[in-house]
Image (spheres, grey):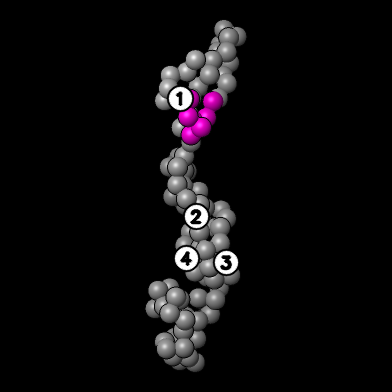
Amino acid sequence: MPVPKNRSNSVRKIHKRTPKGGKTIHYVRRVKGNKHACGLCGCHLQGVHSSRKLPRSARAPNRKYGGNLCTACSSRVLVLRSRLKEGAIKLTDVDVIMLRYVK
Ligand SMILES: [Zn+2]
């Protein structure tokens, strides 16, 4: 019987084979935390990993707003940014939610 701390569902059982041919069980805590979500629409962000073993460049997509916004929202923000820069629209025309990223 495992010790009480390892009887929880938040502990994963991993069956390992020892060099001699025997079997042991390793107990590994499951990773806590929320899924990565888009800052505007809240959808699940793909290609984002929080593992510390990966290099920083492999943890999120290497583009503007990578790891913060989904592709649809980031393209909308980039279009608004360029229109603001050219003077086609004013800052008051932009949604309040998007101001954080457009400014
Ligand atoms: Zn989004």
Q: Closer to us: mark 3 or mark 1? A: 1
Q: CA distance from mark 3 to mark 1?
A: 40 Å
The stretch in magenta equals 7-13
Quarter of the rendering containing residue 92: bottom left
Q: Closer to us: mark 1 or mark 2? A: 1
Q: CA distance from mark 2 to mark 4?
A: 9 Å
Residue lying at 42% horizontally and 22% vertically, measured from the top left = 4
Q: Quadrant of the C terminus?
A: bottom left
Find out if the beta carbon at label 4 lies less than 8 Å from the nearest ligand 1 atom: yes
| First in sequence: mark 4 vs mark 1 | 1
Query: Which of the labelled discs sits on residue 36, or is there none?
Result: 2
Q: Which residue is mark 4?
A: 39
82 in relation to 61, above or below: below
Query: Which of the labelled discs sits on residue 71, or is there none?
Result: 3
Q: Nearer the viewer, residue 48 or 2?
A: 2
- Residue 7 percent across, percent down from the top left: 48, 25
Horizontal relation, residue 97 to residue 13: left or right: left
Q: CA distance from mark 3 to mark 2?
A: 14 Å
- Residue 29 percent across, percent down from the top left: 46, 32
Q: Closer to us: mark 4 or mark 3? A: 4
Find out if the beta carbon at label 3 lies less than 8 Å from the nearest ligand 1 atom: yes
Query: Does the stretch in magenta take in 66?
Result: no
| First in sequence: mark 3 vs mark 2 | 2
Tell me the SS state at disc 3.
helix
- Tell me the kind of residue under disc 2: His
Dot 4 alpha-carbon crowd within 10 angstroms: few under 14, some 14 to 19, many 20 or more: some
Find out if the beta carbon at label 1 lies less than 8 Å from the nearest ligand 1 atom: no
Query: Which of the labelled discs sits on residue 6, or is there none?
Result: 1
